[in-house]
Amino acid sequence: MGIPELILAIVGLVGKAIPPLKRWLERRNGEYAVWKSELTHWAGRPRSISGRFLGREAELKKITNSFERLNVVVLSGGPGIGKSQLAAEYAKKSTRKGFWTPGGETPAQTLISLAPHLGIERGERSDDELLVQTRRRLQALPAKTLWVIDNLSDLDLLNTLLNETEKISILVTSKDGRAVIPEGVEYIPIGVLGPEPAVRLLCRSGHHNLEDSVFFEIVEEVGRLPRAVEALAVQLDSPGETPGRLLEELRAAPDRLELEIFRKQTPGLQIPQTDSLFNALRGPVDALTDDIKEPLAPLGYTADAPIPILLAKALTGLTGGGLINFLKECSSKSVLSADRDQIALHSLTTAVIAATNPNGSLQTALARAASRLGAISESRNFVPAEEMNHYEHMLSWASPLLDQEDEVIRAFSNNLANAYDSAGRFEEAATIHQENLEVRQRVLGPEHPDTLTSRNNLASAYDSAGRFEEAATIHQENLEVRQRVLGPNHPNTLNSRNNLASAYNSAGRFEEAATLHQENLEVRQRVLGPEHPDTLTSRNNLANAYDSAGRFEEAATIHQENLEVRQRVLGPNHPNTLNSRNNLAEAYRALGRDADANALFKQD
């Protein structure tokens, strides 16, 4: 073989090798090259305040040096100390591509919060499916990627999270003050500002004499806590305010009841001047007009995490220009920060809002949250994971403060339980439905429609949790009441009979399930007609019950009837028609009629 022929052969071999090699690399890297355009870098990260970020030069340098040796750094400190802003300033300064997400109560919650940033939409995916997709993409990210986990409640979660990542860098902020953390993690405690940086932050507008001792007195009055000093800077620049008057306002005795509520929401605050701190933080909130304070009030019961904009709209009751004006006014007073997808309130500010809210604000928040949950349920979507912790926090607020017989809390907790059920958290759903049932039985009586609804919800939660016999017992109770009160043909009675049949089927009591579905079918054929959608559903349920009971010939006959009606009424390509065709094919398979089954599958 000559030299030209050899070169051509090598080129040919290389050409054949490149496509398989490319496919192998894509598989090995989680097909990063395919989906990297879907990444959303730094969505939700607090805005950099650059020139106004003072007194943290040493901490910024330490973070930089730590990441030269390690992949994980933890910033730890109490509320208001400036951990999140420090993380945001480092992320901005580092110029790395990365992601900003809130810490969850579990490693799974924390990972799932990363999913939308990685281009993974929830859609119909369960939490487990989201986790699989998130892990795959997380492990394929480039080594220089930075993931900031803001406000991780428990540093013990780090052990699990570190097993989910390999080469990327992780920067964690946490109030968890323990010093014992996993090996290979840099732990950096964050303290209050020094006197001079605190005064510079207070006098950030540049209109004041920084040598005036009154400014040092002001910052010492709030323990040089960055969040409090920022709030005071807003007040100091307000019209008519003077340093002397501001110091007097800080030292004034606050309302004891409001202060007590504030203290309960800020446990472990290591600052002796709590009175002055409360006065400092409430100043910007008090400066808002009444038409801004009213929609702000429900946000005082949210969790210490970013609030998705759709939830913010629901809780404030604002949309369009009204919401834009609200966000503008609150941002101008440093009450909150906002971007396109979420808003953020500092935990101390949230506590102040709750402490100073007028009576009825909590009920308003619960009612609006219940409406939001109900709308999500009606649309058959999952409640976003980033919203769930806010609803849970509201419930923790309401449980000790409101009468458990208040229908507002009952409606809210019922919708939250339904959200738990959709998310696969069946035992938690059952617990809430059980509480609701006990209250409604006591207040409304055992046969009230709302009581029957609560009993049905509890039974459905038991069924989803695999507690089939308990579910069947409760559905049986509901059916007996509805047959007696509403009659055997009422839609709610039919619904109870269907639910009991489903519970029987889950429990393996197939013949009893078939009997109930047969009763429902006879009623619906007589009342609604043989081609009504509800009649077709009952006929489908009966056929499935026969199939479970091993009565395959009867199942096939009924599925054939349903298929003929649906093809005629709905058309051959309607989803319900396709479902009937699939069910009939499965029945044929059970009978060993594979040729007939395959013919139906080919039609799909």
Image (cartoon, helix red, strand yellow):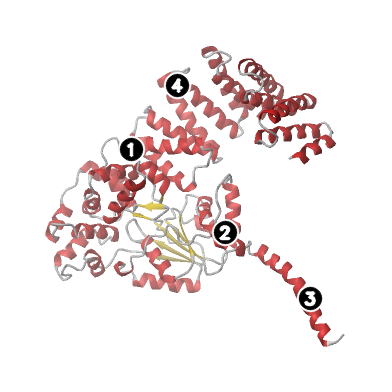
Q: Are marks 4 and 2 in contact (CB under 8 Å)?
A: no
For label 3, the SS is helix
Q: Within 10 Å of the Cα at label 4, are there few (<14), some (14-19), or many (20+) other Cα atoms?
A: some
Q: Nearer the viewer, mark 4 or mark 1?
A: 1
The residue located at (60%, 21%) in the rendering is 497
- Identify the residue position indicated by label 2 in the image: 164
Which of pointers 4 and 3 indicates the residue nearer the eye? Answer: 3
Question: Where, quadrant-wise, is the C terminus in this rendering?
Answer: top right
Foreground label between 2 and 3: 3
Q: Secondary structure at mark 4?
A: helix
Local packing at callout 2 (Cα closer than 10 Å; few below 14, some 14-19, many 20+) is: some
Given contact means CB atoms under 8 Å apart, are the residues at marks 1 and 2 in contact?
Answer: no
Residue identified by numbered label 3: 12
Looking at the image, is mark 3 or mark 1 earlier in the sequence?
3
Circle 4 residue: 441
Q: Earlier in the sequence, mark 4 or mark 2?
A: 2
- Mark-to-mark CA distance, 4 and 2: 47 Å
Q: Amino acid at mark 4?
A: Gln
Q: Quadrant of residue 372?
A: top left
Looking at the image, the residue that sits furthest to the right is: 1
Measured from the top left, where is residue 423 in percent x and y? 54, 41
Q: Is residue 236 above or below residue 56?
A: above
- Which residue was labeled with disc 1? 362
Task: Residue 80: name its quadrant.
Answer: bottom left
